[in-house]
Image (cartoon, rainbow, N blue to C red):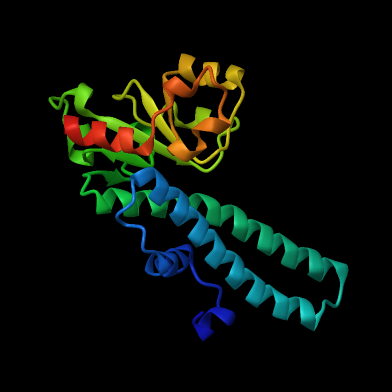
Amino acid sequence: MPERWLERFPTPQEIFDRALALQAHRGLPMDERMIRCRDCEYAVFRSVEHAVESRVIEEGFNSIDEFLARAQTILQRRKSRAGRSLELQLRAILDEENTAYAFQPTTESGNHPDFIFPSQEAYDDPDYPVSRLRMLAAKTTVRERWRQILNEADRIPVKHLFTLQEGMSENQFAQMRDENVRLVVPILLHTRYPQSVRGELMTLQDFVSETRAIA
């Protein structure tokens, strides 16, 4: 661990770059690569967090308010890391697979979907076939936040949503299906979903292959 990280907590990009340097998984299938990348990045993050915060805890706190403020900082850092690291992981895999995309482009009403395929220019071109456009949102967990993506790219009727959430109810899956949201889930997590919906899940490999085929 770089010594400077003990004085200034590293950015999500720095942690991700460190995790990427530690991996030797680039020849693996995309879905397995994603899971291993997630696990490695999280392990790096937790090791840095432990090293940094252990020193703070050992020094002690002068008041409950000071303790709570530090705890809030830690919790907020964890929350912001989760979403940012997922975006970085997806971008790394798309780049490794030479897949054209636009990251957080601007669409209608100033919205910013996570990924548009193949490009912002293609999306903005009214003559570009809608059938060849794809949108991918990225959310570590779904819950009710999936509805946020419905208006992010009006030209694209089916919204693809990549998630690492380990399972959901048939009822929630049906709600998403009714809104033309299609889940993209690493194949290693498919068994966590109800048997009745597994056939409708896309793998990351499926999504990338389809996107490249129509571009």
Instruction: Check the image and name the residue furthest to the right.
Output: 63
Where is residue 186 drawn, in percent x and y? 44, 39
Would you place residue 49 above or below residue 95 in this image? below
- Residue at image point 53% right, 31% down: 191
Would you place residue 179 above or below residue 63 in this image? above
Where is residue 141 drawn, in percent x and y? 56, 39
Would you place residue 147 above or below residue 58 in this image? above
Q: Nearer the viewer, residue 120 or 12?
A: 12
Residue 107 visible in this rendered orientation of the protein: no
Q: Nearer the viewer, residue 24 or 67?
A: 24
Residue 191 appears left or right of 87: right
Residue 10 appears left or right of 94: right
- Residue at image point 54% right, 57% down: 81
Instruction: Check the image and name the residue furthest to the bottom.
Output: 3
Residue 126 appears left or right of 156: left
Where is residue 20 drawn, in percent x and y? 39, 64
